[in-house]
Amino acid sequence: MHKSSVTANFAAVETPRIHGDPCTVVLLGATGDLTRKKLIGAIYDLLRKELVAEDLSVLAVDREPMTDDAYRELMRQSLKSSDEVKGYDEAIFARLARRTRYASGDLTAAPAYAGIAATLAEMEGGQPQNRLFYLAVPPVIFTPIVTQLAQWRLAERTSDDRARPWRRLIIEKPFGHDLESARVLNDLVLGFFGEHQVYRIDHYLGKETVQNILVFRSANAIFEPLWNQAHIANVQITNAETVGIESRGRYYESSGVVRDMFQNHLLQLLALTAMELPNTFDANDVRNEKVKVLRAVRPFLAGGKPDAVRAQYAPGTLGDKAVPGYKQEAYVAPDSITPTYGAIRVLIDNGRWRGVPFYLRSGKRMAKRVTEIAIQFKVPPYLICGLSGPTPDLPVEPNKLVLRVQPDDGVTLRFEAKIPGAAMALTPEIEVSSVDMNFGYADAFGAETHPAYETLLLDCMIGDATLFTRSDEVEAGWRLTDPLLDHWEKRDRPPELPTYAAGTAGPLEADALVARDGFRWRRL
């Protein structure tokens, strides 16, 4: 049996995008990796594509003393070395640079905010403008920043998102270290600002395939009627990375794969896949349905022991390059039992999904970089006798719908077809093969895609919170993962974790997790 591929033909279409409000973007943590590698490029591209007002301004703030011109040069070099910026143009950069200022200071101390206030007053000419504060900083200093922004009246509470000038905050993940710390942070932030002003960012939600999940279901009559336990056998949500922890050893030792990937990214993908379709695409309608799904998930320790696997990457090979194991990475304890791989079997106790296992897996140093949602349908019960497939017990492969989140955004539909040959009536066996029909965003909508941070920054400037997480959504995620973390970190602390060689698909224990239900992981 062999697999074929069919590529659908699409006429490239460039769709118009809504224009962002004029505003001053205040980058807190302006020399860090996130700002240099993602945010500067996103702002530049919004200006290049004329999706923001010409009078957009940037105030960069960080600890290092630096002149305006020195920071502008840092921006230039960041743009030139960016993998996401397509077509650097010095004239466009000059437009951005002349509206960029830099202020230095310790973001945990009051004097920094006196400097921010004075610089904003100069930039805005005494007339308050819309302000977007981006907290591109370690979570440990979220509290003093939020407190100082409010106390210095750099950002004030507004009655609703129609108030002008608006004040909005983008807060990076992780939002809390556990449920209790997330609640404390939510109480602090919402004590100073309205929910409509707070944009808790998860960059996965800015990716095209993720945004398309609800449209894909609601706009296509061939899928939504099948989106339930009567037709779907299992769902696999995978995030696999070829990179290790790089220089993040200190952070990762206190985090691990569950906090780093499951509590936010993978639970978000789960919620969007499993949620009921909302009445509208209004931000609160969408987020209401996501929260309902998370609340319907069966507790991970419902049976006393989690249906979950953890492991740690060991030395291995990626391509022709030998790579170290996790314990050999910088800032990692030589006896560390921090997991770099996790797999969880998830059940959703509602009418749509009762009995359908969702398998979530994520790992570092794996064989391939891929993030996808794979929906496997049930084999039809009314197969014609004589079909010849992979095995006598499996005359045809199950149909699969795969939503590719990265690196190649798109959709693949795998279905079965007869292999060309003799007339069916003349052959004792009818040989069938799996065929893939592929759709790629770049093919259909033009070569230039919109990076996640560009999309999310624009949405914040517009005031669309659909792709950002709400306070109850954050807490619902922690409510699921907290018991698992408590179990692994306090009650079940083995001297060694299972391992998997770097460059492979993960540990054998993860294969056994899905095999108990009669399934197997999609090959990376």
Image (spheres, grey):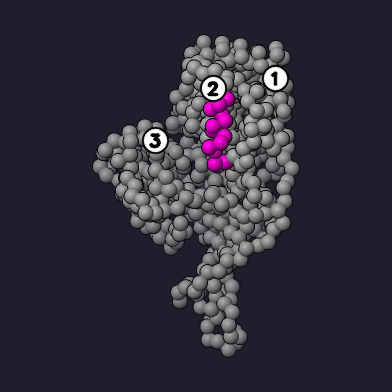
Characterize the local packing of mark 1: few (<14), some (14-19) or many (20 or more) Cα atoms within 10 angstroms.
Answer: some
Name which quarter of the figure residue 515 lies in: bottom left
Asked whether 234 or 216 is in front, the reply is: 216
Relative horizontal placement of residue 203, taking residue 284 as reference (left or right): left
Mark earlier in primary sequence (2, 1): 2
- Image height check: is 206 above or below 96? below
Q: Evaluate if marks 3 and 2 touch, with contact meaning CB atoms under 8 Å apart.
A: no
Residues under labels 1 and 3: Cα distance?
38 Å
Q: Overall secondary structure of the magenta stretch?
A: helix
Name which quarter of the figure residue 101 lies in: top right
- Image height check: is 219 above or below 244? below
Residue interval drawn in magenta: 70-84
Determine whether the residue tagged by mark 1 lies in a helix, strand or loop.
loop
Q: Residue 258: tell me if it is visible.
A: yes
Determine whether the residue tagged by mark 2 lies in a helix, strand or loop.
helix
- Taking the spot 42% from the left edge, 45% from the top edge, the residue there is 243
Please, what is the three-letter code of the amino acid marked with disc 3?
Ser
- Taking the spot 26% from the left edge, 39% from the top edge, the residue there is 335
Of the numbered discs in the image, which one, if any, rests on residue 129? Answer: 1
Please, what is the three-letter code of the amino acid marked with disc 2?
Ala
User: Which residue bears the numbered disc 2?
Assistant: 70
Please, what is the three-letter code of the amino acid marked with disc 1?
Gln
Q: Position of residue 314 (x, y in %)?
A: 31, 48
Relative horizontal placement of residue 463, taking residue 429 as reference (left or right): right
Q: Position of residue 497 (x, y in %)?
A: 30, 46
Of the numbered discs in the image, which one, if any, rests on residue 247? Answer: 3
